[in-house]
Image: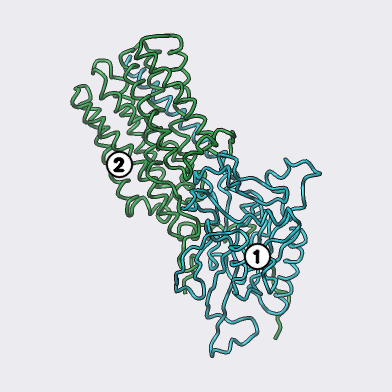
């Protein structure tokens, strides 16, 4: 007789209540973060044509982010309650501050850029946004890994690299689409490097999760999005490398990379939900851990005597 | 022994009460569900549908935003220690009243981004409904699947260990209503001593399966304010076999996020340097 994995096959942990706004935000936030850093680097390198495009892509992506986050709340009117504490044990708390600061900086930078005013304020704003960019792109991976959802917590070492790669691929791709080819070299290279990192980190993540816990990345919606993400990212990266110097090629490659990055976040989202719903992913690894651990949570004492 | 819970140390000593909790002794649970009813009534919880699950006498199913005590019923073809079930073959019926564990290291409290979830002066974990904005992060951080969002008000809800009753020196409604003292309320140190004695007593009369769950400060949640005496593996009751608070690995997660951020910066830098070469 096989041991039961749960109570009437019911889930042991609760399925996340987050709606598709959340993976959409993971995409827009990642895009915004990497393009903010690209903006700062382009400015430092003296490539103002590229910096302007990257700044506008960054601002467009960060503007929709708070709206997505607020819409997902059970009580949207109370969004501001997020700003009454600052907690390092809560990646969501830290993230809210990062989004708020980075979004404000990007908004100021873009306003100055479009109106052509206050160059020093603009430089300061771009610097703040550029330095926060890497955190904006990767904290969301820490956010989901800080959970009991098996595919998320199990991939806590790899997931931030998946998000970093995916952010670079989408930001490089998006900025290359809007920038004259002669100035877009760094964006194209960032896109290719990002796509390679995304694919490599995804592979490492699936290897880490293993056959059992990694199943949701090969089944149902999680599997579908994971497959689409890999295909679009690989195709986009290749196309950017071979045809990115032509505007049409850059547009096609950039679109593929953005689609790949979005699918990647939806794969993580759906695989997470699937892995919480099925008690096997919680029960079986824990049971294995318990049988090898020194102090199990159940402390059965040795039997002293038997009544007959 | 179980350590001082995270966060209670922030109370000045004169305001701090002795840590209290539940010892749920499932070996004497008779499945009457008085705890479920008393909890619903006292806490004014909405009904969650009159449905037949087909799972023995359990038509409640799970703990969620509207159910803070849940009685599980498990039918097994196993003997009841030395007794005769009287049905011609080995048979036993396990019943267990589940509840929020009020963990020593509480994931829900750690990740709550509004500070709505806090540690009370009694060492229990409570959600302030007027602060909670329904972000749902606590749902993903609970190793036991206790917290959930209530659709009618968008907020997160779970057992408060009857915080209002404790303030008035009363015991929680479920413990008050339990007719067999399967649910025992009291100072945690007293309950733990009693629970260990009870396990020994059961072992002596031949109930070898008896074991305590979450009564050990070395487990993944640092022991719990609500612990249990079980007669089978935890997963049989729908409880995780080796629960770990996700924030235990916080350093690793922030470290990985920081390293990945550094990789992003390196990628951007390489994109510019590569072009000049």
Residue A298 location, x and y as percent?
Answer: 63, 63
A111 or A280, nearer to the observer: A111
> CA gap, disc 1 to disc 2?
52 Å
Does B177 sit left or right of A111 as displayed?
Answer: right
Residue A47 location, x and y as percent?
Answer: 33, 12
What hue does chain B carry in this figure? Answer: cyan
Q: Identify the secondary structure beneath mark 2.
A: helix
**Same chain shared by disc 1 and disc 2:** no
Residue B196 is tagged as none
Residue A199 location, x and y as percent?
Answer: 34, 38
A243 or B115, nearer to the observer: B115
Residue A230 is tagged as 2
Q: Chain of mark 2?
A: A
B219 or B146, nearer to the observer: B146
Q: Quadrant of residue B174?
A: bottom right
Residue at image coords 58%, 49%: B245
Q: Chain of mark 1?
A: B
Instruction: Tell me: residue A235, above or below residue B46.
Output: above
What hue does chain A carry in this figure? Answer: green
């Amino acid at each position: 007789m096989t041991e039961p994995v749960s109570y009437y096959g019911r889930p042991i942990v609760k399925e996340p209540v987050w709606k598709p706004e959340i993976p959409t935000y993971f995409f827009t936030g990642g895009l915004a973060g990497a393009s903010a850093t690209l903006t700062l680097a382009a400015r430092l390198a003296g490539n103002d044509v590229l910096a302007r495009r990257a700044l506008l892509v960054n601002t467009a992506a960060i503007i929709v982010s708070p709206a997505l986050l607020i819409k997902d709340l059970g009580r949207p009117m109370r969004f501001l309650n997020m700003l009454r504490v600052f907690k390092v044990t809560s990646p969501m708390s830290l993230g809210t501050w990062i989004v708020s600061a980075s979004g404000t900086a990007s908004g100021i930078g873009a306003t100055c850029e479009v109106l052509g005013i206050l160059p020093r304020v603009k430089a300061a704003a771009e610097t703040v946004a550029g330095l926060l960019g890497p955190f904006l792109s990767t904290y969301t991976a820490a956010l989901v890994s800080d959970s009991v959802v098996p595919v998320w917590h199990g991939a806590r070492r790899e997931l931030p690299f998946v998000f970093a790669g995916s952010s670079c691929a989408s930001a490089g791709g998006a900025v290359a689409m809007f920038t004259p080819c002669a100035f877009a070299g760094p964006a194209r290279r960032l896109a290719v490097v990002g796509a390679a990192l995304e694919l490599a980190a995804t592979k490492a993540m699936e290897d880490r999760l293993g056959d059992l816990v990694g199943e949701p990345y090969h089944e149902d919606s999680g599997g579908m999005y994971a497959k689409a993400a890999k295909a679009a990212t690989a195709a986009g990266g290749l196309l950017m490398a071979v045809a990115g110097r032509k505007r049409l090629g850059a547009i096609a490659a950039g679109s593929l990379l953005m689609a790949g990055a979005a699918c990647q976040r939806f794969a993580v989202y759906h695989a997470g939900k699937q892995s919480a719903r099925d008690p096997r992913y919680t029960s079986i690894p824990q049971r294995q851990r318990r049988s090898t651990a020194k102090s199990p949570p159940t402390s059965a004492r040795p039997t002293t005597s038997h009544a007959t | 022994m179980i350590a001082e819970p995270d966060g209670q140390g922030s109370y000045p000593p004169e305001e701090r009460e002795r840590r209290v909790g539940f010892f749920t002794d499932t070996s004497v649970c008779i499945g009457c569900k008085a705890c479920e009813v008393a909890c619903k009534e006292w806490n004014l919880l909405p009904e969650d549908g009159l449905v037949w699950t087909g799972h023995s006498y359990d038509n409640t199913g799970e703990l969620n935003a509207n159910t803070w005590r849940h009685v599980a019923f498990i039918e097994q073809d196993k003997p009841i220690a030395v007794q005769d079930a009287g049905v011609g073959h080995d048979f036993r019926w396990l019943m267990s009243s589940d509840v929020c564990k009020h963990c020593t290291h509480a994931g829900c409290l750690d990740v709550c981004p509004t500070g709505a979830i806090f540690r009370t002066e009694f060492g229990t974990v409570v959600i302030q409904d007027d602060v909670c904005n329904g972000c749902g992060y606590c749902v993903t951080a609970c190793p036991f699947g206790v917290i959930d969002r209530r659709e009618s008000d968008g907020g997160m809800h779970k057992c408060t260990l009857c915080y209002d009753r404790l303030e008035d020196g009363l015991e929680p409604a479920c413990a008050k209503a339990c007719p067999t003292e399967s649910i025992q309320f009291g100072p945690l140190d007293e309950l733990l001593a009693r629970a260990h004695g009870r396990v020994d007593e059961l072992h002596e009369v031949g109930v070898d399966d008896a074991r305590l769950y979450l009564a050990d400060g070395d487990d993944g949640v640092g022991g719990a304010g609500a612990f249990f005496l079980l007669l089978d593996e935890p997963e049989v009751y729908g409880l995780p076999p080796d629960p770990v608070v996700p924030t235990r690995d916080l350093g690793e997660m922030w470290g990985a996020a920081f390293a990945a951020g550094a990789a992003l910066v390196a990628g951007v830098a390489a994109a510019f340097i590569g072009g000049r070469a």
